[in-house]
Every structure is written in C-alpha cells, then in structure tokens.
C-alpha cells in the first residue's frame, strides 16, 4: 500500500495536534522543560481575530506526523514582508520520506504567493541533521549574525 501524504492549513480544531507536535519537537531538542503552550494559548494566538502565527500540518494516511509553524516579519532592506519559520518538525518514525521537504516547500510556495522577500529560521548549533537538510536545499546559514532574546522575565524587568 502506498502512503498518502497531505498538507493542510491548521484550524482551531487542530490545537491539540499542534500542542502534541510542539511537545514532540521540544523533546527532540531537549527543551521539554520550556514548553508553556496549552491548547487554549494555541487557539488564542493562532486562530482568534488577531492571529500571530500560522501552521501547516502534514498527515500520512490521515495521521498527523509533522508541522511547520510560521509568522510574518518585515525586512527594512528588502522592503517586503518575509516569513519566519518558527518550527519545522516531522516525527522520527516518519523521517526519510521527504515529508519535511514537502512541508518546507509548501511554506516557500506561500512566501512566493505572498510576495515575500525572505524565508528565515534558526537551527540549534548541535542539530547537524537539520543543518545538512537545509543546506542541501540551498539555504545559507548566516554566521555573521548572533541571535539575542529577551525572555518574559527580562521583559518584565525592563518595563
């Protein structure tokens, strides 16, 4: 039997699936202790009137096996919107079938349709399989940039 793979934009009813996939990627990245997401927060920030992000879910034979969660940013230099890929993840037992590439290419198609100037993302330094995957697709790492972050505690302290 041939596996059927399809990609669908997530809906509010998929909040539980998205949360499960977030927990799966957090476990893979050894960051499970940092997951604060809930189904309620996913619905609030992805599907209410002011949505901050979007999500594509990959299904093999109607079973959710991966996702791409993304949002828009803006490049002052290019003077166009861009897409920032927050997470791209395929469950381990489904890897090697091209599903990650299909999810990423679906996102690239969205970027093209929306006239975006860039698609960008971050990769953990230790994640060689992900780095190899992206570089094989023609992506370039930006080694002249360093990512900085203010977490909730730092934000609260500053205000």
Image (spheres, rainbow, N blue to C red):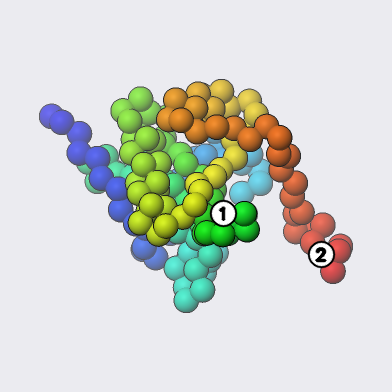
148 or 37: nearer the eye? 148
How many marks are shown on the rendered structure?
Answer: 2
Query: Taking the image as drawn, is residue 51 in sight?
Result: yes
Label 2 to label 1, Cα distance in Å? 32 Å
72 or 20: nearer the eye? 72
Where is residue 59? Give x, y as percent. 29, 44
140 or 17: nearer the eye? 140
Residue 138, compared with residue 150, is above or below; it is above
The answer to whether residue 99 is left or right of residue 116 is left
Where is residue 31? Give x, y as percent. 63, 39
- Mark 2 vs mark 1: give the one in front: 1
Furthest residue in direction bottom, as rendered: 49
The local crowd at label 2, few if under 14, some if 14 to 19, many if 20 or more residues have their Cα within 10 Å, is: few
**Residue sitting at x 20%, y 34%:** 3
Per the image, the residue denoted by label 1 is: 78
The local crowd at label 1, few if under 14, some if 14 to 19, many if 20 or more residues have their Cα within 10 Å, is: few
75 or 156: nearer the eye? 75
Q: In which quarter of the image is the C terminus?
A: bottom right
Res. 156 mark = 2
**Residue sitting at x 68%, y 32%:** 143
Residue 129, compared with residue 69, is above or below; it is above
Where is residue 89? Give x, y as percent. 46, 39
Query: Taking the image as drawn, is residue 103 in sight?
Result: no
The answer to whether residue 9 is left or right of residue 85 is left
Q: Is mark 2 on a helix, strand or loop?
A: helix
Q: Quadrant of the N terminus?
A: top left
Q: Is mark 1 on a helix, strand or loop?
A: loop
Where is residue 112? Give x, y as percent. 38, 52
Sequence-wise first label, 2 or 1: 1
């Amino acid at each position: 039997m041939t596996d059927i793979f399809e990609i669908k934009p997530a809906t509010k009813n998929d909040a539980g699936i998205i949360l499960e996939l977030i927990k799966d990627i957090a476990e893979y990245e050894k960051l499970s202790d940092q997951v604060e997401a809930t189904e309620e927060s996913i619905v609030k920030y992805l599907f209410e009137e002011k949505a901050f992000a979007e999500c594509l879910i990959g299904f093999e034979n109607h079973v959710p096996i991966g996702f791409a969660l993304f949002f828009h940013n803006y490049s002052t230099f290019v003077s166009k919107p861009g897409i920032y890929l927050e997470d791209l993840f395929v469950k381990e037992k489904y890897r090697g079938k091209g599903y990650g590439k299909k999810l990423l290419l679906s996102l690239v198609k969205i970027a093209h349709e929306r006239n975006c100037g860039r698609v960008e993302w971050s990769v953990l330094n230790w994640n060689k399989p992900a780095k190899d995957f992206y570089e094989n697709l023609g992506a370039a790492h930006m080694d002249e940039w360093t990512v900085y972050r203010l977490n909730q505690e730092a934000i609260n302290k500053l205000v």
